[in-house]
Amino acid sequence: MNINELKQLEDQLWSAADSLRANTDLKPNEYSTPVLGLIFLKFADNKYGAAEEAILKEFNELKGTRREKTLAEIAIKHCGFYLPDNARYNYLLELPESEDLASKIKEAMQAIEDHQGQEDFKDVLPKNDYQAFNRLPQSKQALKGLVRSFSNIPSDASGDVFGKIYEYFLGKFALSEGQKGGEFFTPTSVVRLMVEMIEPYNGSVYDPACGSGGMFVQSLQFVERRKELSKKLGEAETNNSLFVYGQEKTLDTGKLAKMNLFVNGLKGDIRQANSYAEDPFKGFEKFDYIMANPPFNMDDVALATVEKDPRFNTYGLPRNKTKAKKADDNAKTETVPNANYLWINLFATSLKNAEQAKLSNSGRAALVMPNSASDARNSEADIRQTLIKNNLIYGMLTLPSNMFYTVTLPATLWFFDKNKKDDKILFIDARNIFRQIDRAHRDFTDEQILNIAMISKLHKGRNHEYISLVDDYFRQGMAKLEATVPHVEPSFKKLKETLKDDVAIVQSVDTLNEHWHELKPLQESFDTYVKTFPQVVTKDLVNKLNEAQKTLRASFTPFFKAIADEAKVLDKAIREKEKAHNELVKQTRAEVAEAKANDKKDLLKVKDAKLKVLNALSADIKDVKSLLADIKADRSEAEYFFNHISWLQERFPNAVYEDVTGLCKLATPEEVKEQDYSLNAGRYVGVVIEEDGRTEEEFLDYLTSLNEDFKQLNEQAATLESVISQNLNSIVSGAV
């Protein structure tokens, strides 16, 4: 299943699930877990189905022998669980209308829990949650419809596909549930950036506030991506494996995490525990990697709970506030003024010590903190200074606003490294790097994540990976361009045929076509580049390859500019053509109405015929605009990857790390001390004043173009309003 097919499937499945909002009396927080449970059930059926032949074969071979085993025992060995008939998805799908589907799903879930190899998987799956669908007749039908919709997931869909669908649904539910949803879900793009920065290759991953387990899933996916990159870089193959440890104080959210691990095939241990008071894994200096998005700004943690715990007091305790508890009128309980630095302490102390980290090339952590923690004063400042002097902080990355579903509070990513190669701190300001999802939410694209992470890799001297990333962008961009080429000529031909009476448009189409033909020598240059590109990118080839890549990228700049400029000319000409045509249609409609009102049948016949011709041309113009939009979109998709190449090459032209104003700064201990040990990235990277590169004349032309577009939209709106009014009048008069 390719990316587009998966995206289409995800959207279809979500549409089916989201329809529950309108077709039942259930709220999202009532149906989110049952929906995720059905996804799990379909995954279990797929996984079992893939292993069923081998299970039955072994069962029949051992039957009647001294080594005879039950079907369940063999199934658990092969795929981790056994599915009796009543737990198969088709059994539920084909149940008669008279059966209580909710009860049958509950039985299926229970059957999976009763026949699986993980001792701690008892009471994890949703069972009683489905009874809410029995409240109303329409809810019962909605549940049946949901089961049918999820049956569209292909029977050969693997765990990877299910993992992506599961994470997609978690994100959707988090978005729909707002504050509550954000408690168990950190946006995937933020998690992926954290993972790309700390690179959990192998060993243990710990999340003391694990929510639904998204950090773990992205860690696993990173390992898979890294395997592919290692081949390209000629690195030795290793058997990378992860074991994850998670703590979650909320029972139901912890269950989501266990389901998430099961769906993604991850090995791990999830415990319900309050990280302030409980340490179920004996985590002091235990873990290779740590990631978390802990709760911000908690102020009710009793000091007595943490003051003797080395996880929290090694680098100092945040303290200075006494607060009376309502539950105890006779005493005052001293609390930690803000728990942010408790979490920071926990991360620093839960990583393996420097010696162990060096041996395993690990000891890295990433956590989310509010921006205020970077400059916190009093005891928090003392703790921060101690961490800096102990050279634990690798980097600080300021995130854009509106990245989280819960709050718009600005946030910063903190990165620790027990295996640092220098005593500097890498500051990255990513506030201006984002994709706008909707009015209130943003995220990172995959390419933005890789670009930001590349800053860290360049700092670590891994510039051969920079070359590899640029090469990937070239290949993806060219693949998009070459896929577009077969459609260009037919599209231009249709454009000319449709509007052949307009000389200016025909000329513009010819010019645009000529620009597209300029792609051929560029393809030849790219083919030469590919032929000379080494199978393995080594550090000694970086300078040579970097110069070749910069030259190649520069050769594409005039091509994309010429295409974009002429497309604007053609688009403007077609819009003007459409405007004049719409005026003629409007006038002809008025003439038809007048002939009809005056009962001039001969004239009406002529005008009707003219209107039919004009309406046909209207449809043709609409098709032409659609064709042009498709060509522009295809070009834009290809140019997208070339723009990312430009982004990297403009900032790091020599394929080595360098400070970039407004983006990144490698600060020395002395520079940090001068800033009173602040870890606010903005203090170090500076601000760049962006210019649009336009002259005053060009800017005025740009404003004029915008004004023309605005006028065009207003005219189209007026025309549409007139048509709607005429149609309504016709309906009313006909009814009368």
Image: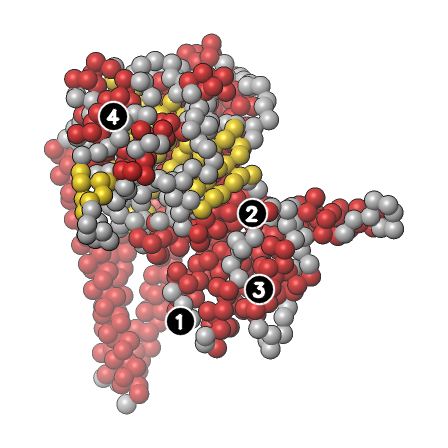
Find disc 3 in the rendering and name its residue.
105
Marks 1, 2: nearer the viewer: 2
> Which of the numbered marks, if any, corresponds to residue 384?
4
Q: Is residue 277 left or right of residue 322?
A: right
Q: Earlier in the sequence, mark 1 or mark 3?
A: 1
Mark 2 crowdedness (10 Å alpha carbons): few <14, some 14-19, many ≥20 = few
Looking at the rendered image, the quarter that the C terminus falls into is bottom left
Dividing the picture into quadrants, the one containing residue 285 is top left
Disc 2 and disc 4 in contact, CB within 8 angstroms = no
The residue that label 1 is drawn on is 25
What residue is drawn where x is 27% and y is 24%? 427
Which disc is residue 625 wearing? Answer: none
The quadrant where residue 663 appears: top left
Mark 1 to mark 3 CA distance (whole Å): 20 Å
Task: Measure the alpha-carbon separation of dots 3 and 2.
Answer: 21 Å
Q: Earlier in the sequence, mark 3 or mark 2?
A: 3
The residue identified by callout 2 is: 120
Task: Give the secondary structure at mark 4.
Answer: helix
Q: Nearer the viewer, mark 3 or mark 4?
A: 4
Q: Secondary structure at mark 2?
A: helix
Mark 4, Cα crowd under 10 Å, few <14 / some 14-19 / many 20+, is many
The vertical placement of 530 against 46, above or below, is above
Give the Cα distance between marks 3 and 4: 52 Å
Q: Residue at x 24, y 60 (%)?
A: 716
User: Is 230 drawn above or below residue 2 in the view shown?
Assistant: above
Given contact means CB atoms under 8 Å apart, are the residues at marks 1 and 2 in contact? no
